[in-house]
Image (cartoon, helix red, strand yellow):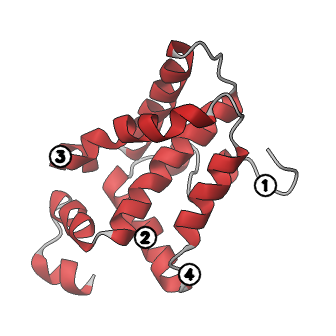
Amino acid sequence: MSEQRRNPGDDPFCGRPDQFEGRLIGEVVLEQYKRLERSGNADQTLMLLGVMTDDARPEIRPLLASWLDEASAPAVSFPFWRRAAPSVLEQFAASAAARARQEGIEPTDDDIGLMAGLAFLNLVYTVQREPSAKAFVQKALGIGLFGRLFG
């Protein structure tokens, strides 16, 4: 990683699993989305995804796109968004490590943290760019129409 970049696990977007104890993954993703919306910098998530991808070790980079698709596949179901956030982040980390090993790469803690952080940011970016995705997450969390329109 470049000297100017912080550890992805220290980034408020990625966090550590224990940081989100007692929270649902849908709540955490919507919270991050709202932070971005308030900041007025709509491109921040996409930029951060790019920076984190660039910070990945060269051996890991080729895995990222296909792995992100696999890691985010469960997000098309309501139950995914009702899962505990730490559980989802731990699942992302385990899946990242398994995928790297499957490709013959022994992942470092930084690799695993970066990949899990990318998976989380990918969820935030999807909600950010697709209003229907945001509505889907809100509905999965039981947020009614009024809350979806004005929440």
Answer with mark 4 or mark 2, whichever residue precedes in sequence. Answer: 2
Residue designated by label 2:
33
Q: Is residue 139 left or right of residue 60?
A: left
Residue designated by label 4:
41
Answer with mark 3 or mark 1, whichever residue precedes in sequence. Answer: 1
| Residue visible at 24% across and 87% down in the picture | 150
For the residues bearing labels 1 and 4, Cβ distance under 8 angstroms: no
Residue designated by label 1:
5
Callout 3 amino acid: Ser
Answer with mark 1 or mark 4, whichever residue precedes in sequence. Answer: 1
| Residue visible at 85% across and 57% down in the picture | 4
| Residue visible at 44% across and 34% down in the picture | 67
Which sits in the foreground, 80 or 143?
80
For the residues bearing labels 3 and 4, Cβ distance under 8 angstroms: no
For the residues bearing labels 1 and 2, Cβ distance under 8 angstroms: no
For the residues bearing labels 4 and 2, Cβ distance under 8 angstroms: no
Residue designated by label 3:
77
The image quadrant where one finds the C terminus is bottom left
**Foreground mark, 4 or 2?**
4
Which sits in the foreground, 30 or 104?
104
Query: Could you say which quadrant of the image residue 139 lies in?
Result: bottom left
C-alpha gap between disc 3 and disc 1: 34 Å
Q: Is residue 122 visible?
A: yes
Secondary structure at badge 1 equals: loop
